[in-house]
Amino acid sequence: MKETNQKFILAGIILTILLAFIALTFITVTLIPDITARLFGPPGLLLDNSNRILYSTKLFLNRDLLLTPYSSSGSDHLFIIKPGETAADVVEDLSNAKLIKAPEIFKDYLVYKGIDRLLQAGTFLLNPSMNPIEIAAAVYDANPQDVAFYFLAGWRAEEIAALLPTSGLKISIEDFLSLVHNPPKSLSAFISPEITSLEGFLSPGNYQVLKSVTVEELIRQLLMNFSNRLPTNYEVSLKKTGLSLDQAIILASIVEKETILPEEAPIIASVFINRLNAGMPLQSDPTVQYALGFSIEQKTWWKNPLTSEDLSIDSPFNTYLFPGLPPTPICNPKVTAISAVLNPADTDFIFFRAVCDGTGKHTFNSTYEDHLKAACE
């Protein structure tokens, strides 16, 4: 009888453990993931079953942390995700900015939703009164508060303006070009009150610009970047060349358009400086291209090749006809072209022409006779 009772007790214990295990399994595998999905939405499609259970449990146990904002009040905060930042970087930045209280749980939520792999660079408008779920949705937004605005060195203002209609910015081509070519003192003062055009001073590169930016704010940002990128002690170099900053940028814009290989830029700069000092015309094709404007036939602002008729165009930008520098820069050069003008090579070259091998190299000569000998056969 005693043995029978013990068997019943043991069977009861085993049954209890089995039922508890079944209940725990049901709760862990089914109930908690279902509740979590109702609270926070379905998990990401790439989350496997074991991780689905793991992260569902973590989120369920810390649900209050995910549904409670950092603060009940606060002001809007511009939060920037830089290109190349990982989810861990973003979570750390959010925590440092006092926008989330529990960074590890927030990161678990990103992984659960599959957002951790999809965060994109951009500027986002966040507020401490937003709970972590709302913040996650905001930084995952496919339409952040800013857009990328990028243009290449050597572009003229019209080429930059042509980007505006598809950029996401509410700035017209006409308004942009009007301010560039007729800048108010509030903009020209960033460079020099004497300049009559901002052509040449619009620093090329990649910008993250707020969608709400005005045309004046956009141009100011380009000008500030230009000022910040000027070589250290550039004023000393200007004195050595005898050029004003405006003149140096005009010459740098020509060097930019004439240079293919960066290492040749200081030599090309020396050629034009030597021509200026000798009272020779610069005879630079890109200045004529600038004077010609847009070529309807070639659909480009930089017509090539030029005809003898093109070289005869009556324009102060035609350096074949008019000595000295053109009135304004002809494009927006990069720092290497500016540095080349500020620190030109020490040469007596006054001629250069492309080598006939298609490499982009040039030959440089001090006499017209040698220059003719270097012509392609």
Image (tube, rainbow, N blue to C red):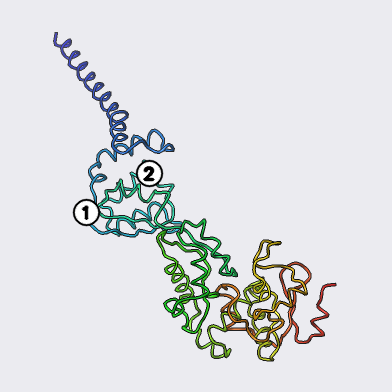
Report, in whole angstroms, how far the alpha carbon at label 2 lies from the one at label 1. 24 Å
Amino acid beneath label 1: Ser
Q: Which residue is pictured at 24% across the width and 50% down the height?
A: 69
Residue topped by disc 2: 111
Q: Quadrant of residue 313?
A: bottom right
| Location of residue 278 in the rendering, given as x and y in whole percent from the top left corner | 69, 91
Up-down: is 131 above or below 286? above
Q: Secondary structure at mark 1?
A: loop
Residue topped by disc 1: 71
Instruction: Assess disc 2: are there few (<14), some (14-19) or many (≥20) residues with their C-alpha within 10 Å of its C-alpha.
Output: many
Q: Which residue is pictured at 78% across the width and 74% down the height?
A: 308
In the picture, measured across the screen, residue 96 lies left or right of residue 177, that is: left
Task: Compare residues 159 and 85 and report the one nearer the observer.
Answer: 159
Task: Compare residues 319 and 24 and report the one nearer the observer.
Answer: 319
Outermost residue to the top = 1
Outermost residue to the right = 377
| Location of residue 108 in the rendering, given as x and y in whole percent from the top left corner | 33, 44
Task: Compare residues 49 and 243 and report the one nearer the observer.
Answer: 243
Check the picture and name the quadrant holding the C terminus: bottom right
| Location of residue 168 in the rendering, given as x and y in whole percent from the top left corner | 47, 56
Up-down: is 162 above or below 257? above
